[in-house]
Amino acid sequence: MKKYLYVDCEALPDYFLKVLETKKLLESGKMKNVTDAARLNGISRSTYYKYKDYVFDAVQLPQGRKAVFVLSLSHETGVLSKLLSEFSSMGANILTISQSLPVGEEASVMLTADITDVVLSDEEMLEKMRSLKGIKRIELIAIG
């Protein structure tokens, strides 16, 4: 099992950052050759190859307000499309959506949305969606 640490670059030898810069040059296509990219960053090819699979840049996740919804929809043409349009009109951005096969004329949907730009309260947003034809049930199960 691999173990990862989140370490401030100030505490690491500079060649780790140089390996990252070399990787970026190669991934972006700005440099095609490992030897030239490593040399440009002041490291040897062997240093690059020794650490390239062990050094990664930290990913900055976008901030904002996310919400997870669970819904039951009527198995009718256009219901999901209307729901997604409603989310969009409120200023929400759909991040993930998972829909089950319909059972007994209903389909379950789990949806994650970025609601950072939604100006309605959570309850107003739910009421607006509940009013749509074909929405049997909607629950806000997580928000953050």
Image (tube, rainbow, N blue to C red):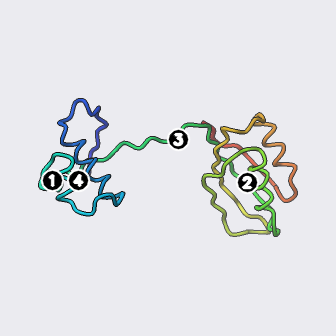
Q: Name the residue under label 3.
A: 62
**Cα distance between the residues tagged 3 and 4:** 26 Å
Q: Which residue is drawn at 75% across and 49% down?
A: 87
Q: Which of marks 2 and 4 is in front?
A: 4
Dot 3: few (<14), some (14–19), or many (≥20) neighbours within 10 Å? Answer: few
> Which numbered disc flags the more N-terminal residue, 2 or 4?
4
Dot 4: few (<14), some (14–19), or many (≥20) neighbours within 10 Å? Answer: some
Q: Residue extending furthest top? A: 10
Q: Mark 2 points at which residue?
A: 71
Give how far across and how far down residue 2 sits, in percent.
Answer: 26, 49
Image quadrant assignment for residue 114: top right
**Cα distance between the residues tagged 4 and 1:** 6 Å
Q: Mark 4 points at which residue?
A: 52
Q: What residue type is labelled 4?
A: Lys
Q: What element carries label 2?
A: strand
Q: Which residue is drawn at 65% across and 47% down?
A: 113
Q: Which of marks 2 and 1 is in front?
A: 1
Dot 2: few (<14), some (14–19), or many (≥20) neighbours within 10 Å? Answer: some
